[in-house]
Image (cartoon, grey):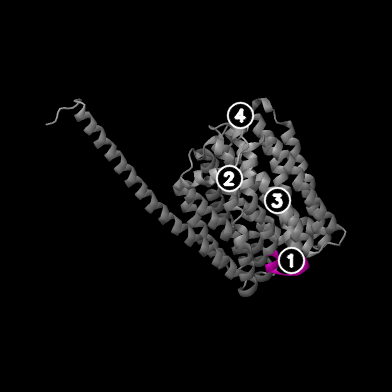
Amino acid sequence: MSPTFSSLRIRNYRVYVIGSLISNIGTWMQNTAQAWLVLVLTDSGTALGVTVALQLLPTLLLSPAGGVIADRFPKRTVLRIMQVMMAVPAAVLGVLAVTGVVQTWHIYLIAFIFGIGRALEAPARQAFVAEMVGRDDLGNAVALNSASFNSGRLIGPGVAGLLIAAFGAGVVGTGWVILINAVSYAAAYIALQLIDTARLRPTPLLAARHGAIREGIRYVRSRPDLVLILWCVFFLGGFGMNFQITSALMATEEFGKGASEYGVLGSILAVGSLAGSLLAARRPAPRLRFIVLAGLCFSALQITSGLMPTFVTYAAILPLVGLCILTMATTANAMIQLTSAPVMRGRVAALYLMVFIGSVPFGAPLTGWIGEEFGARAAVVSTGAIAGLGIMVVSVWYQVRFRAQRKRLRTTVHDLRLKFEARANIRGFRTPQ
């Protein structure tokens, strides 16, 4: 089997990936439909930013608790419960839209409830991969998870745009698309049911005790490499991952396009994202330099995309933007999983997700406001510049911190050697010259 897909030889992981892919397609269909629904009801970039922020805010607030749940309880059980918890609000929103009674506050509330389920599910999902494949295949499996996610991003928005247009590009069309997502969670639930538990490699469960979240935070703070990763993904997530807003604004305001073209932009972006995931799957060992370089390349391409003169040229550069995003995100995720202690993996993954996804609520309203006040191009260019500047600053910090740490280590080793030699002289093990 090709090294790109090596972890698929494991039966449990194959079943899991198939269920996840179907669910991911549904999720991206709903993301597209929900964004379009907000624009139809409000015609406001700020309202769209608020919706995205509310859906992702629980990740910022609840991910640490989700990490403790992932380390405390069987991950497969947690994942099955969370599929139901995410399907219910999707079904409610779909029914409200299909019946034509949906209001903006309904979307805000349901987006927040949906976000709670996602925040509690994501750490268990991240950590469960290691239990299915083991350490040797973990990096490849993490990358293929990203490939599955971005295959959903590739297929979902385009299908959603076509379906919304087929139903008249209005509220009712978005409702049917959202209902399809509610049904798609059944695929993930069934896949989890079909997993052979005898072949899993479960990590020891965390005993119930106070201070588990603080313990995870202390562990991350003791690792400068993990701190660098978290800062990099903060800037990427907060100021670079708001494509639901920027693509919607560029398609509608800058280029005068409709729902189909907006959906196509999401699929085009996913082409590059999928390529980045597959390239990461072939890489034998993730490295910090790939994270930083990919982040800086993303910043440059994001700024360039905001200056593109036509819809076609804007669309043409999006695959490269997606390639850089997923090269950075997948490499960061793989390093988090591979270098963390197994007993800490759920909590470290939770902090990663809290920073990466939870940072979007910081940037989403700002991006929407900039787009509304100064135009779509200003929103794209400014967020790309902020992301690049932030990554450069934390990279310099890491180099200074790393050099200082190595200097302290050399000093400690030198002092220990002198002490050993002094004790050896006293005990007669070494004759003074």
**Could you tell which of marks 4 and 1 lies nearer the N-terminus?**
1
Label 3 with label 1: CB-CB less than 8 Å:
no
Magenta includes 306? no
Q: Which of 185 and 169 is in front in this view?
A: 185
Alpha carbon distance from label 3 to label 4: 28 Å
Q: What predominant SS class does the magenta segment belong to?
A: helix
Quick check: 180 above or below 240?
Answer: above
**Could you tell which of marks 4 and 2 lies nearer the N-terminus?**
4
Alpha carbon distance from label 4 to label 1: 46 Å
Q: Residue 201 carries which label?
A: 4
Alpha carbon distance from label 3 to label 1: 23 Å
Alpha carbon distance from label 4 to label 2: 24 Å
Q: Where is residue 204 in the image (x, y as percent from the top left)?
A: 59, 31
Identified at 52% across, 57% down, the residue is 298
Quick check: 381 above or below 291?
Answer: below
**Could you tell which of marks 2 and 1 lies nearer the N-terminus?**
1
Magenta includes 43? yes
Q: Mark 1 points at which residue?
A: 39
Numbered range of the magenta stretch? 39-48
Identified at 58% across, 70% down, the residue is 378
Identified at 66% across, 31% down, the residue is 12
Alpha carbon distance from label 2 to label 1: 39 Å
Q: Name the residue under label 3.
A: 116
Mark 3 element type:
helix
Q: Nearer the viewer, residue 101 or 374?
A: 101
